[in-house]
Image (spheres, rainbow, N blue to C red):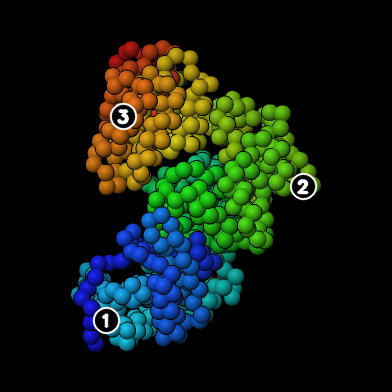
């Protein structure tokens, strides 16, 4: 074995396994993103393709599907690969990139807690690299053989299967069994007749995902099913939260579908999980895309709304043959991207019925102030929009879209219109229905709204609602997660400045949400931007702790004021909700101690 060149800088910034259908393929694969400084021209691409083909032939893979996606910060290089050899495929991709650029990896690129560092194949000449790739692929395939035998048997029995680094499960919910990877049964020992899937839906989009998940779960529960759902606030099974935290990715989906009481599932499916791991499920009866708006640009090669819509629409690959893709007819980017889909059954929703109906059936929207569901053969009047608590008398127009989307998906999952109408008439009446999303308190003559609005579009919707409720002064808390561009922070501040609030408290979104930023850094940018848009500095206090900022807002409030509290850290939100409940219970009045 020999090293041809000295180690070079790593030419990629990210290399990951896609364990399900993904942005690039309908099958598992791997993808890496080149470093911004790498000049990956047509010649380099041709060499990369040739090296991947060479490795694929050496490993005995069928013809390898490849995808190249160029973007503002580099190039994404994807390889479809056997699910039992994804680690080897990652090394194949990295080796092929190094070779295409004439670079060599360092000698110690893989570290393990219980084993010494292992040299990367790209450290060696081509013959030795291919030998190492063959060895690792064969070992990986041999180690995964018991799992693959079960996956093949599950496919033959038409039973859904989930496989991760620790557990393999067959079936879903009440029809599931699971085993640690070290204790897998043989296919003949599996009680196949006891295993089955459950009805399920996926929900994605830039805004409104969690509200739509919770509402759809309530609609399914009205139909008599024990429902499990996952979202940014955790995992809930039959009304009980079993896990807290952000479970809007593959781990949340697996947790719900492995919960033994679940008879139907609603799974929030965020952009990050789709890009990092691909889809965790298939065979869904419905998939919703609520909307797309400017957010998370610059991550994983996603730079435009069209890019983001393409990512969100990956959920269409999770649908069963007769499944329904539920899309927003009022979102021009989604409409344009949906035109590229072939053979997918689509249902359309919008705030108004006419544009939804014009795109095709089924459809759901508002006609003459009433929510109408159309399935082609019939129309169903589900009630007055203004009487649905989630719409705040019809003023929360963005929630009209969430309601229409959930209703269409519920119909695809077999929920009858009468059950839908009963839920829509009460959901949102209690703050417990939708924690952290448009929760309302009346404290004396001060109205308080607590919400999750976190990007310009979400804040615009919240401020549009505030304009209809505002009687006196407006105060708002403002912060942002650190993993966005400075332009995104300024866009959020501009959105708030247009509402002309009397006071804005600048805060951190702490914990994991700082994401590489120093405490106070985002607050400084927001404050600077708000001041540049005409708000005086004395109206822009900095209080980095979310809960303390909410307390300051309450102490500032006077009768007739409206307070908007976008709070994002789960533990801070719990503190603020507890305080607001306590103040409301004791009849607190503005101007008195908290």
- The residue located at (64%, 30%) in the rendering is 385
Q: Using the rendered image of the protein, determine whether residue 148 is visible from the camera's viewpoint.
A: yes
- The residue located at (41%, 30%) in the rendering is 494
Q: Where's residue 173, x and y in %?
A: 52, 58
Check disc 3: other Cα within 10 Å, few if <14, some if 14-19, many if 20+: many
Contact between marks 2 and 3 (CB within 8 A): the answer is no
Q: Where's residue 264, x and y in %?
A: 57, 53
Secondary element under disc 1, as helix, strand or loop, is loop
Given residues 317 and 280, the one toward you in this image is 317
Circle nearer the N terminus (2, 3): 2
Q: Which residue is mark 3?
A: 527
Q: Using the rendered image of the protein, determine whether residue 28 is visible from the camera's viewpoint.
A: no
Q: Where's residue 399, x and y in %?
A: 56, 35
Q: Which mark is residue 376?
A: 2
**Above/below status of 369 relative to 299:** above
Q: CA distance from mark 2 to mark 1?
A: 63 Å
Secondary element under disc 3, as helix, strand or loop, is helix
Circle nearer the N terminus (1, 3): 1
Q: Which residue is mark 1?
A: 124
- The residue located at (43%, 69%) in the rendering is 42
Circle nearer the N terminus (2, 1): 1
Image quarter of the C terminus: top left
Q: Where's residue 380, x and y in %?
A: 74, 39
Q: Which image quadrant for residue 555? A: top left
Check disc 1: other Cα within 10 Å, few if <14, some if 14-19, many if 20+: many
Position of residue 262 in the picture relative to residue 141 (left or right) = right
């Amino acid at each position: 074995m020999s090293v041809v060149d000295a180690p070079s800088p790593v030419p990629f910034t990210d290399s990951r396994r896609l364990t399900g259908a993904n942005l690039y393929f309908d099958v598992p694969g791997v993808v890496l993103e080149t470093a911004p400084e790498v000049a990956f021209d047509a010649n380099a691409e041709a060499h990369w393709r040739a090296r991947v083909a060479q490795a694929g032939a050496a490993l005995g893979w069928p013809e390898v599907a490849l995808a190249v996606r160029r973007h503002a910060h580099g190039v994404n290089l994807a390889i479809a690969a056997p699910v039992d050899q994804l680690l080897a495929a990652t090394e194949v991709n990295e080796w092929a990139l190094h070779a295409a650029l004439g670079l060599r990896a360092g000698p110690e690129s893989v570290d393990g807690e219980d084993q010494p560092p292992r040299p990367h194949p790209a450290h060696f000449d081509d013959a030795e690299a291919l030998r190492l790739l063959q060895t690792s692929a064969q070992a990986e395939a041999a180690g995964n053989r018991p799992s693959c035998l079960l996956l093949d048997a599950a496919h033959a029995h038409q039973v859904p299967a989930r496989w991760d680094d620790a557990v393999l499960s067959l079936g879903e919910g009440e029809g599931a069994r699971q085993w640690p990877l070290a204790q897998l049964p043989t296919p003949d020992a599996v009680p196949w007749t006891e295993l089955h899937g459950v009805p399920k839906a996926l929900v994605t989009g830039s805004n409104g995902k969690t509200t739509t998940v919770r509402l759809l779960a309530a609609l399914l529960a009205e139909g008599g099913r024990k429902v499990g759902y996952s979202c940014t606030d955790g995992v809930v099974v039959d009304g009980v939260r079993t896990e807290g935290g952000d479970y809007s990715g593959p781990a949340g989906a697996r947790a719900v579908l492995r919960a033994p009481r679940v008879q139907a599932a609603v799974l929030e499916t965020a952009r990050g999980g789709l890009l990092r791991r691909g889809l965790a499920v298939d065979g869904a009866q419905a998939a919703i895309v609520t909307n797309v708006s400017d957010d998370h640009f610059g991550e994983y090669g996603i730079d435009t709304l069209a890019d983001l819509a393409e990512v969100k629409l990956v959920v269409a690959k999770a649908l069963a043959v007769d499944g329904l893709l539920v899309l927003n007819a009022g979102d021009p980017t989604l409409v344009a991207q949906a035109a590229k889909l072939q053979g997918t059954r689509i249902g359309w929703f919008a705030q108004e019925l006419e544009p939804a109906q014009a795109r095709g059936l089924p459809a759901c929207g508002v006609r003459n102030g009433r929510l109408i569901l159309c399935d082609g053969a019939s129309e169903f009047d589900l009630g007055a929009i203004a009487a649905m608590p989630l719409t705040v008398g019809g003023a929360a127009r963005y929630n009209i879209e969430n309601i229409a989307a959930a209703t269409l998906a519920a119909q695809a999952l077999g929920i009858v219109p009468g059950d839908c109408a009963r839920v829509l008439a009460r959901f949102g009446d209690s703050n417990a229905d939708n924690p952290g999303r448009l929760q309302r308190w009346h404290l004396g003559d001060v109205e308080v709204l607590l919400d999750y609005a976190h990007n310009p579009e979400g804040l615009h919707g919240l401020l549009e609602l505030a304009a209809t409720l505002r009687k006196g002064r407006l105060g708002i808390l403002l912060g942002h997660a650190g993993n966005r561009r400075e332009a995104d922070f300024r866009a959020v501040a501009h959105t708030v400045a247009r509402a002309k609030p009397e006071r804005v408290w600048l805060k951190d979104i702490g914990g994991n949400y700082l994401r590489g930023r120093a405490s106070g850094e985002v607050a400084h940018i927001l404050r600077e931007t708000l001041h540049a848009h005409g708000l005086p500095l004395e109206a822009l206090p900095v209080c980095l702790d979310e809960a303390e900022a909410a307390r300051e807002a309450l102490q500032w409030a006077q009768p007739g004021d409206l307070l908007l509290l976008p709070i994002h850290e789960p533990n801070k939100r719990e503190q603020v909700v507890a305080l607001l409940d306590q103040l409301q219970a004791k009849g607190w009045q503005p101007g008195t101690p908290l």
